[in-house]
Amino acid sequence: MKKLSAKKIVFLLAFCFTCLIAANAVNAVEMTIGQVRVNVTFNARVADTWNKVTYANPTQAEADRYIAMMKTELEKYPPGYLQKARATHLILGKNLKIDGVARAAVPDPYGNRLYLSTNGMAGAGSADYLVHVLHHELNHNAEYAIWNDQYYRWNEWASANRAGFAYGQGGASAYSGGGRDYYTMTHPAPGFGNIYQTLAQEEDRSEIVAWLMHDVERDAFIRLCREDAVIRRKARMINQLLLKLSGARAQDVYWQKANACFAN
Ligand SMILES: [Zn+2]
């Protein structure tokens, strides 16, 4: 056998070393969720539409834990949903911010992206909160997919509210809202489960979706639904809208649970 020259050995060692580094620097995985090929990035910078989103990299353990939760939750949607809802690139970050302001997530449907904070808003947030945020934010992508507008004003929706009701200044206004509790389900007014919903139509709908998809929060919302005809009407409207987007049937297993909200 021909002996390897010193030069060749050095070359081979350098080559192996490069391979090793490449193998360790995994920063994205492709996975199938609900029959959709999804790209999940958790260790790299992914440019957003506004160039204003920042985050740190989660540790491998944090990323793994988040991905396991995310997969379970997203599998609840009908097959093909993530594609239809324009959320095929999921970017996981820690201490996520947009324009320097902490956020638990940033929907960027313009690029089929959804940025998700593995540690909630600035580190605050229980495991249940992360589940809620995931469904809420995915709904923003879905609404963009339907209307080409994340802030669409749906006339029928507005008329579903009690006469004279007007929404507030949008979801972002909550970030400067002092210590006010926007998110607890307190039923602050007829037609609304929490104060956050009163800020804008899209937040109203996204909260309903999050409650309906959340195994821990759903029952409380269904109780609310049964005692408030406006909430019941709106829950049915958003359910019908998303059914249409998904191409699924109302009786499809998971979404059937949401129907408990307005079924007699
Ligand atoms: Zn929102």
Image: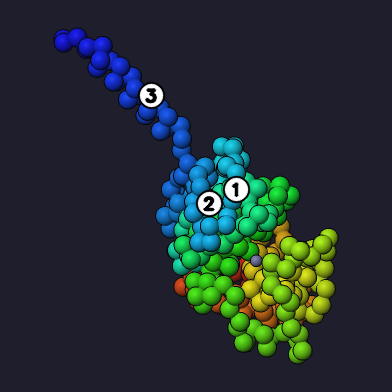
Q: Give the mark nearest the N terminus, 3 or 2.
A: 3
Q: Quick check: 210 above or below 28? A: below
Whether the residues at callouts 1 and 2 have beta carbons within 8 Å, the answer is yes
Measured Cα–Cα span from mark 1 to mark 2: 10 Å
User: In the structure shown, which secondary structural element does the residue marked by tag 2 occupy?
Assistant: strand
Residue at 66% over, 54% down: 100
Dividing the image into four equal quarters, which quarter contains ligand 1?
bottom right
Whether the residues at callouts 1 and 3 have beta carbons within 8 Å, the answer is no
Quadrant of the rendering where the N terminus is positioned? top left
Residue on which disc 2 sits:
91
Residue type at tag 3:
Phe
Residue on which disc 3 sits:
17
Q: Position of residue 172 (x, y in %)?
A: 69, 67
Residue at 26% over, 11% down: 6
Instruction: Left or right? Give the position of 197 relative to 29.
Output: right
Any mark on residue 55, and which?
Answer: 1
Measured Cα–Cα span from mark 1 to mark 3: 29 Å
